């Protein structure tokens, strides 16, 4: 499907959803509240989720409209304007998330992201991870990101239109020729400046126990020693080193930032989101550690190094998820 065909479906769909959710609010609001109360969900998670959907759909509509305006005035290639739009969009989405769900984010470690150039390797646990990382990078660290994202996210109109006008890469995880994809990542990282960071999720997908078991089994078939080394993981998925290594190859002077968070765990499905919103949310905690490039090995040693970093992050996540009195 071409970009024009994709957008001919996605943009009208979002505009229709935004209009319908707003116009039908007097209908769905009491029905959703009643459904929550009947189930004993006093925090009204269905209402909260639909309220966020209203905010998301209208922010999508506004974002696409602004992008269209930039195109009309000949600013389609104005990276500065589009980075500003990205920063505004991520900030407003985070504000909407906090307002509708009550979720708060503590991102004290955002200071470790600057200066660039840097390669940021992020934990992937929920549907909100891309938003969290974009908000931390753009609003808290005041940097401009270059993202590696799966191409399925092109279904999101703002990510599709604005994301393709900025230096991002939408990865085809099923590509028959991985060399082409990795070459594109090296090109993406080339030329990173002091105010930029390349962001990738080395796990490749949202973490869950079944996915962890399948990933470890696949690794065991090729490398039993590595599978044994990673078997103690309880929260993260085994990292895939190729993409991260390609980014590092594109920018040899970039430091590495390993980032993880807790508080969005379980938000990998809509059912999980509803269960999460039914409880009083604990603050989302974003953590990161910066590693000097001189301390990052290359070649075959990189996989072992990345595994060690991921095991360390897994233990940190496990500790943060324990009740206060047991930490």
Image (spheres, rainbow, N blue to C red):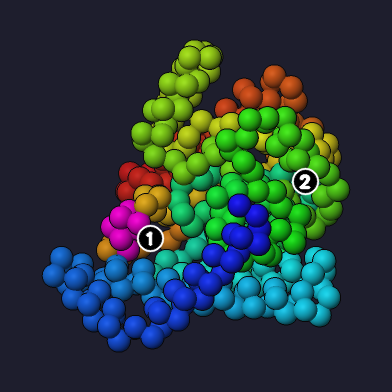
Q: Is residue 275 magenta?
A: yes
User: From where the camera sits, is residue 147 visible?
Assistant: yes
The number of discs equals 2
Badge 2: residue crowd in 10 Å (few <14, some 14–19, many ≥20) = many
Instruction: Give SS at disc 2.
Output: helix
User: From where the camera sits, is residue 276 visible?
Assistant: no
Where are the magenta residues, as a range? 270-277
Going from N to C along the chain, the mark reached first, 2 or 1, is: 2
Foreground of the two, 295 or 151: 151
Q: Which residue does the image show at 86% across and 48% down from the upper left?
A: 191
Does 300 sit left or right of 102 as displayed? right
According to the image, label 1 marks what residue?
Answer: 282
Q: Which residue does the image show at 77% across and 74% down from the upper left?
A: 71
Name which quarter of the figure residue 81 lies in: bottom right
Q: Which mark is residue 77?
A: none
Does 233 sit left or right of 12 as displayed? left
According to the image, label 2 marks what residue?
Answer: 188
């Amino acid at each position: 499907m071409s970009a024009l065909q994709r957008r001919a479906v996605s943009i009208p769909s979002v505009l229709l959803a935004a209009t319908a959710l707003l116009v039908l609010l007097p209908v769905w609001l009491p029905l959703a509240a009643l459904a929550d109360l009947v189930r004993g969900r006093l925090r009204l998670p269905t209402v909260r989720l639909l309220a966020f959907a209203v905010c998301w759909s209208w922010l999508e509509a506004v974002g696409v409209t602004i992008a269209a305006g930039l195109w009309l005035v000949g600013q389609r290639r104005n990276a500065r304007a589009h980075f500003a739009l990205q920063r505004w969009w991520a900030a407003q989405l985070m504000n909407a998330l906090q307002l509708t769900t009550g979720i708060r984010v503590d991102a004290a470690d955002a200071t470790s992201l600057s200066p660039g150039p840097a390669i940021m390797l992020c934990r992937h646990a929920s549907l909100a991870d891309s938003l969290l990382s974009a908000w931390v990078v753009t609003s808290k660290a005041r940097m401009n990101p270059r993202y590696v994202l799966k191409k399925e996210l092109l279904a999101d109109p703002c990510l599709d239109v604005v994301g393709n006008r900025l230096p991002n890469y939408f990865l085809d995880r099923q590509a028959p020729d991985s060399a082409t994809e990795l070459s594109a990542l090296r090109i993406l990282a080339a030329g990173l400046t002091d105010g930029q960071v390349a962001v990738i999720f080395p796990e490749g997908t949202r973490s869950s126990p079944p996915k962890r078991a399948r990933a470890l089994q696949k690794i065991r078939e090729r490398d039993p020693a590595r599978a044994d080394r990673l078997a103690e993981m309880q929260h993260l998925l085994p990292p895939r080193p190729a993409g991260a290594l390609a980014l590092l190859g594109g920018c040899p002077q970039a430091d590495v930032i390993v980032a993880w968070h807790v508080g969005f765990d379980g938000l990998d499905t809509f059912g999980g989101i509803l269960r999460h919103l039914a409880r009083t949310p604990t603050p989302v905690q974003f953590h990161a550690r910066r590693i000097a490039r001189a301390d990052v090995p290359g070649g075959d040693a990189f996989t072992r190094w990345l595994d060690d970093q991921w095991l360390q992050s897994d233990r940190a996540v496990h500790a943060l998820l324990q009740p206060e009195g047991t930490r």
